[in-house]
Image (tube, rainbow, N blue to C red):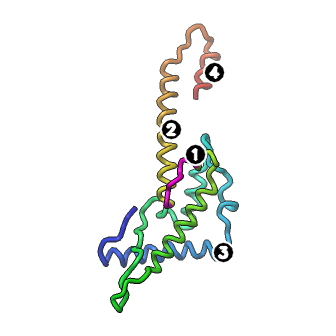
């Protein structure tokens, strides 16, 4: 994730957080429960692409994709006020609250079996990238397996119809 650096970056990130907060606040104010309203599929071992499509679409619809992509600058937890005192940063509080809501949303859309893979994840970005890495690794392994199956498939004594059925069964 992006972290703040200088004061001009802090001003830009504040504007970015404010934009996302208006989306987040409208999400909370409308009383919409995105889990029941928009996501009909719980992530299982065999439906990652369908689950990802629904989750990404819903999150993008609320303009909150930066939380799962790690593109939103995380505001500093504390800032110095006009009196040169260190105080809690309201932008950080808003950011953290929204991130926790997205975490809850993601976690509630994942089956128990898959939940064990995200234990220890602290942010929506962590959850998202952990799931992506896990399923992309599985997809790569499956691709290699199926490619090998197709490359070694031989017609032999099979009729053309039987051979094509066999190939279709691999796919």
Q: Is residue 28 left or right of residue 70?
A: right
Mark 4 or mark 2: name the one nearer the start of the chain: 2
Helix, strand or loop at label 3? It is helix
How far is mark 2 from mark 3, CA to CA? 38 Å
Is the C-beta separation of discs 4 and 2 under 8 Å?
no
Mark 3 or mark 1: name the one nearer the start of the chain: 3
Residue that carries the numbered disc 2 in the rendered image: 139
Viewer-nearest of labels 4 and 2? Answer: 2
Q: Is residue 101 left or right of residue 143?
A: right
Residue that carries the numbered disc 3 in the rendered image: 30
Mark 4 or mark 1: name the one nearer the start of the chain: 1
Is the C-beta separation of discs 2 and 1 under 8 Å?
yes
How far is mark 3 from mark 1, CA to CA? 29 Å
Chain part drawn in magenta: 116-123
How far is mark 2 from mark 1, CA to CA? 10 Å
Mark 2 or mark 3: name the one nearer the start of the chain: 3
Q: Position of residue 91 (x, y in %)?
A: 46, 77
How far is mark 4 from mark 1, CA to CA? 27 Å
Mark 2 or mark 1: name the one nearer the start of the chain: 1
| Residue 79 in which image quadrant | bottom left
- Image disc number at residue 48: 1
Residue that carries the numbered disc 4 in the rendered image: 165
- Residue drawn at point x = 66 percent, y = 74 percent: 30
Q: Quadrant of the C terminus?
A: top right
Q: Position of residue 17 (x, y in %)?
A: 46, 74
- Residue drawn at point x = 57 percent, y = 48 percent: 116
Q: Quadrant of the N terminus?
A: bottom left
- Disc 4 crowd rating (10 Å Cα; few below 14, some 14-19, many 20+) is few
Helix, strand or loop at label 1? It is helix
């Amino acid at each position: 994730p992006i972290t703040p650096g200088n004061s001009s970056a802090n001003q830009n990130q504040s504007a970015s957080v404010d934009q996302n907060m208006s989306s987040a606040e409208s999400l909370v104010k409308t009383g919409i429960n995105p889990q029941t309203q928009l996501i009909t599929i719980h992530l299982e071992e065999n439906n990652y692409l369908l689950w990802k499509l629904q989750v990404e679409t819903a999150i993008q619809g609320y303009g909150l994709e930066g939380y799962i992509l790690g593109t939103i600058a995380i505001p500093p937890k504390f800032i110095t006020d006009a009196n040169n005192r260190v105080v809690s940063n309201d932008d950080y509080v808003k950011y953290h609250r929204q991130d926790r809501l997205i975490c809850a949303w993601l976690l509630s859309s994942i089956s128990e079996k898959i939940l064990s893979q995200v234990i220890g994840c602290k942010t929506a970005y962590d959850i998202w990238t952990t799931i992506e890495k896990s399923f992309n690794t599985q997809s790569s392994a499956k691709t290699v397996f199926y490619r090998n199956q197709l490359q070694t498939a031989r017609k032999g004594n099979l009729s053309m119809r039987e051979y094509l059925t066999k190939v279709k069964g691999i796919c």
